[in-house]
Image (cartoon, coloured by chain):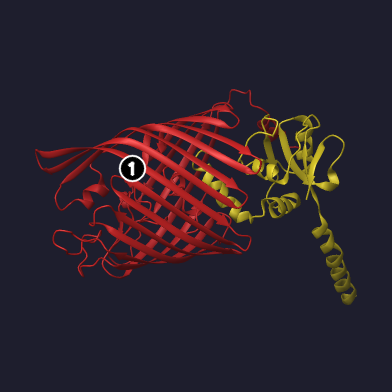
Chain colours: A red, B yellow
């Protein structure tokens, strides 16, 4: 008879003053290669681009998370991520205090993920989703994190379980790498300041159905630098709408779709079917980015498989084909999102292999 | 002799197989807990979708190691997911500050003892160990 009384004590409502530390991590080692065409932007927020033979750096990343629980209500969490796309610089992606108001409600304050998309919160954790990568055309918002607060509540009505988040804050994107790249033809640098961000996310799961909607608004000041000493400032009122739905069939088939509108800029969406059988999860997905102006428009079709090799790691293969329909309305010429497209149209196929893990 | 060993091995496989299949598990709560819990409510609590019982008091789910007999049954019959799918589910919540998997204790006896002591705890055990110190709310 060995009773683990230490554990038993931990489970009781905590009154002890000792700080309880926990440590976890995740990572993805990704290798990809363009097999037809010139270059492929696999990850927009950090500008992960495949263009030259077999490359490991565009999407390879590692994250570690440390959490210190001071008591049963208050905790501090930090998540640091290092990415090949950012020369493996270590970045603080999350750093927040969390206070549990009731068993089902809490408030987080600090540096947080902007939860606009269904997969926003864990888009870096490849192990948590079936695809090799989150549909890139759809998950392209340049601001992924923010400084501010988030209030979270859970409640249910019969078998329907809800999550509600209210959030607000600001984000500074100085010398945005993505925006700088997209507008390199006429600017040398783009700074974006997001103020008065405020939003709401409501999710519900009912049996095998999941639905989530979000609405976010804010003020954005964009400073475009054309040459040293020459800059222009544009103020935008931005609004972001997102809706996601997913249904899991008993057969192992799952269908999902997500649609979002980023006013006054673009619309993007994806749909995917996955089929889980044993340790394999096969997928097909289609995603599209459509700028309101004709300059940028592209869609990607992907097929692939996730193979759960072990309890904490998975191997994935993916074949993606992107079609670029962006063009310059003044000249009528193609305007591919990948700028060094030599054959002009920007269409590209890329094959990738990944190992995702958690620890 | 060899034949006999083979036969007895075969016999024990035949005998134990139906037993394994029939192993039932019970979801148990403290005697002071008067909540009626549907299968969906039990699943909701164990998956961290809700952290209270229907009455509003805090619910603390307790699990057993994933290879324990009761866990294997619970994963198959209640979660209806593979152990790997569960791991993937919890990794979503863990890295987004939304929750952590239920704490694990070593055995049916440990779960029984915790549930008997704490009105907020809910656990699952092999039905054969359930006694008068706890209340059974569901059987799978």
Task: Please provide percent x and percent y for residue A170.
Answer: 33, 33
Task: Please provide percent x and percent y for residue A308.
Answer: 55, 61
Determine the secondary structure under disc 1.
loop
Q: Is residue B103 above or below residue B73?
A: above
Tell me: A299 left or right of A174.
Answer: right
What residue is at 55 percent from the left and 49 percent from the top?
Answer: A210
Mark 1, other Cα within 10 Å: few <14 / some 14–19 / many ≥20: some
Q: Is residue A277 above or below residue A232?
A: below
Q: The N terminus of chain A appears in which quarter of the rendering?
A: top right
> Which of these two is toward me, A230 or A68?
A230
Task: Please provide percent x and percent y for residue B134.
Answer: 82, 36
Residue farthest to the bottom, as pictured? B3
> Which of these two is toward me, A159 or A44?
A159
Q: How many marks?
A: 1
> Which of these two is toward me, B133 or A21?
B133
Q: Chain of mark 1?
A: A
Asked whether residue A49 appears in the rendered view, the answer is yes
What residue is at 59 percent from the left and 36 percent from the top?
Answer: A155
Tell me: A71 left or right of A1.
Answer: left
What residue is at 69 percent from the left and 34 percent from the top?
Answer: B54
Tell me: B62 left or right of A32.
Answer: right
Q: Is residue A322 above or below residue A3?
A: below
Give the residue number, with chain letter if any, for mark 1: A143
What residue is at 64 percent from the left and 26 percent from the top?
Answer: A14
Tell me: A346 left or right of A168.
Answer: left
Q: Is residue A219 above or below residue A281?
A: above
Task: Please provide percent x and percent y for residue A102.
Answer: 59, 27
> Which of these two is toward me, B88 or A79?
B88
């Amino acid at each position: 008879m060995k009773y683990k009384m230490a554990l038993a004590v931990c489970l009781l409502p905590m009154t002890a003053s000792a700080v309880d530390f926990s440590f976890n991590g995740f990572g993805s080692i990704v290798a990809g290669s363009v097999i037809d065409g010139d270059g492929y932007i696999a990850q927009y927020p950090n500008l992960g681009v495949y263009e030259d033979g077999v490359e490991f750096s565009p999407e390879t990343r590692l994250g570690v998370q440390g959490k210190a629980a001071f008591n049963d209500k208050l905790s501090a969490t930090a998540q640091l991520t290092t990415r090949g796309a950012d020369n493996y610089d270590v970045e603080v992606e999350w750093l927040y205090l969390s206070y549990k108001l009731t068993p089902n409600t809490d408030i987080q304050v600090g540096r947080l993920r902007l939860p606009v998309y269904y997969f926003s919160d864990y888009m870096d954790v490849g192990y948590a989703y079936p695809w090799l990568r989150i549909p890139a055309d759809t998950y392209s918002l340049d601001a992924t994190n923010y400084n501010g607060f988030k209030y979270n509540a859970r409640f249910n009505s019969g078998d329907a379980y809800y999550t509600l988040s209210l959030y607000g804050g600001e984000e500074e994107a100085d010398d945005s790498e993505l925006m700088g790249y997209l507008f390199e033809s006429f600017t040398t640098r783009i700074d974006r300041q997001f103020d008065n961000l405020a939003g709401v996310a409501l999710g519900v799961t009912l049996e095998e159905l999941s639905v989530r909607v979000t609405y976010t608004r804010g003020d954005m000041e964009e400073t475009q630098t054309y040459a040293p000493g020459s800059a222009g400032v544009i103020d935008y009122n931005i609004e972001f709408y997102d809706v996601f739905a997913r249904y899991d069939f008993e057969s192992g088939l799952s269908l999902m779709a997500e649609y979002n509108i980023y006013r006054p800029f673009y619309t993007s969406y994806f749909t995917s079917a996955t089929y889980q059988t044993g340790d394999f999860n096969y997928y097909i997905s289609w995603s599209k980015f459509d700028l309101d102006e004709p300059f940028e428009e592209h869609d990607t079709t992907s097929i692939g498989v996730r193979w759960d090799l072990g309890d904490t790691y998975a191997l994935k293969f993916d074949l993606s084909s992107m079609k670029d329909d962006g063009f310059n309305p003044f000249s009528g010429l193609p305007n591919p999102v990948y700028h060094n497209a030599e054959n002009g149209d920007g269409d590209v196929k890329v094959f990738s292999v990944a190992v995702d893990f958690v620890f | 002799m060899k034949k006999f060993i083979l036969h007895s091995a075969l016999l024990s496989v035949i005998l134990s197989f139906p037993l394994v299949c029939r192993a039932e598990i019970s979801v148990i709560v403290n005697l002071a807990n008067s909540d009626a819990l549907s299968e969906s409510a039990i699943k909701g609590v164990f998956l961290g979708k809700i952290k209270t019982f229907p009455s509003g008091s805090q619910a603390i789910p307790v699990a057993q190691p994933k290879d324990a007999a009761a866990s294997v049954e619970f994963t198959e019959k209640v979660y209806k997911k593979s152990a790997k799918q569960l791991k993937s589910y919890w990794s979503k919540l863990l890295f987004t500050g939304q929750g952590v998997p239920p704490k694990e204790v070593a055995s049916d006896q440990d779960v029984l003892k915790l549930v008997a002591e704490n009105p907020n705890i809910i656990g699952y055990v092999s039905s054969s160990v359930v006694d008068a110190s706890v209340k059974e709310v569901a059987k799978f």
